[in-house]
Image (tube, rainbow, N blue to C red):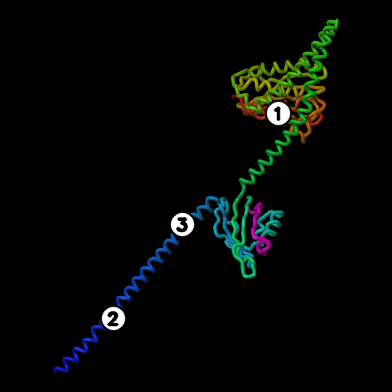
Amino acid sequence: MTGLLLYAQAEKTYYLPLMWAVGILVLIILLVFVVLQYRWHKRLKKELTELENLRQGNVEYEFVLKAMKLCTWHIDPKLRTMTVENDFREGLNNSVGPSSSIDLLTDMLEHTDAQRVQGALDDICSGRTNFYHQQYYVKAGSYWEESFAMVSERDENNKPTMIVGTSMRIDDQKNMETALINARNKAEESDRLKTAFLANMGHEIRTPLNAIVGFADLLPVVESEEDRNQLIVEIQNNNQKLLRIIDGLVSMSKIEAEAKSLVRSQVDLVPILQDIANTYTAIVDGTSVVVATQFPYKELLINTDVEKLKEIVDNLMQNAVKFTDKGRVTLGYDITDGEHISIWVKDTGKGIAESDQERIFERFVKLDEYVPGTGLGLSVAKSHAESLGGTINLESRLGVGSTFRVELPLN
């Protein structure tokens, strides 16, 4: 009995350390599991944060692409294919497919652009260049485009394996460039015309001024009353010529400075036109050239700027009388549609060639340098007509004559 009890106690002596060992082992496993769980949770949290940052970056990236209206793509140099990734260009229906051969893309371009773009693509695909930048006109969609690209990956032989690029429409930029070029050309032409004008202006002003001074010096020594009257008439005629030259310069300076605003009023048109006709009737000789009028009504009310209207008609009459050696200069008007009036001056003068009929209204243009004038009259008339809400046009044949028409609103 005693032996059996000792055996049982011996068994319990081994059992207790075993239990402690198992407990410690379980505790160690639990601690390892907790540590691993903590690390896994920390890594998962980090990956979630990176994923959120990546998602936010993609949102911002897409926002930038949309804001800049870009198309992004990449090229596989070995397969020579282009794959479009995003396309936010306006007015396009992805005319380039998701994946297309770059050898076929140039078929969409103008011939001169296609050769240049194809050469640039060949250079970057072969590795001869690292960057690509081209502007070209896409005839398939009738728009201008600009593209940038660069090599993003290379193989062990330093050959390109991936090329990334972007494209954007530049229609507004090209339109602005065209407008700037036209403005520059116009400014250069205007500067050239002004130079020619200034070179000619001294002669134009000096001619009537010399006549005025010369005839005025002769007045005290001329005894014949008839001769004196003739000198006075010549002085008055040259005085009018000089005044018209100065008036043209003043009118043009006011137009350029926009210092002359509209002063509209209700006036009777017929007396105004008749006074101008009477003025030029006294200027012409009445034999080889006759000034006539053609007024369908004896009275016609119009709401306009009287001074500008007078200046328009006066410049047209002056131009007609100047270039008509024989025949007739006729001043008249027609009511076109009940809301507009057409004031016209018709002459039987030398006429204007069709090639010159557009530029005749430009400033400082003189088709005949031997005829006195500043080249401003028709330009002033055109500017005034437009400021009054109207238009001016010309019908002319060489050797037959010309008709200038000014369309103005009645109110």
Q: Position of residue 153 (x, y in %)?
A: 59, 65
Residue mark closest to the camera, 1 vs 3: 3
| Among the two numbered marks 2 and 3 on one chain, the one whose residue lies closer to the N terminus | 2
Q: Residue at x 54, y 57 (%)?
A: 86
Residue located beneath label 2 in the image? 22
Q: Residues within 10 Å of mark 2 (few under 14, many from 20)?
A: few
Judged from the image, the secondary structure of the residue bearing numbered disc 1 is helix
- Quarter residue 224 falls in: top right
Residue 97 makes an appearance in the image: no
Residue mark closest to the camera, 2 vs 1: 2
Judged from the image, the secondary structure of the residue bearing numbered disc 2 is helix
Residue located beneath label 3 in the image? 56
Q: Which mark is residue 379?
A: 1
Judged from the image, the secondary structure of the residue bearing numbered disc 3 is helix
Q: Position of residue 98 (x, y in %)?
A: 57, 61
| Among the two numbered marks 2 and 1 on one chain, the one whose residue lies closer to the N terminus | 2
Q: Position of residue 301 (x, y in %)?
A: 61, 19
Front residue of 66/357: it is: 66
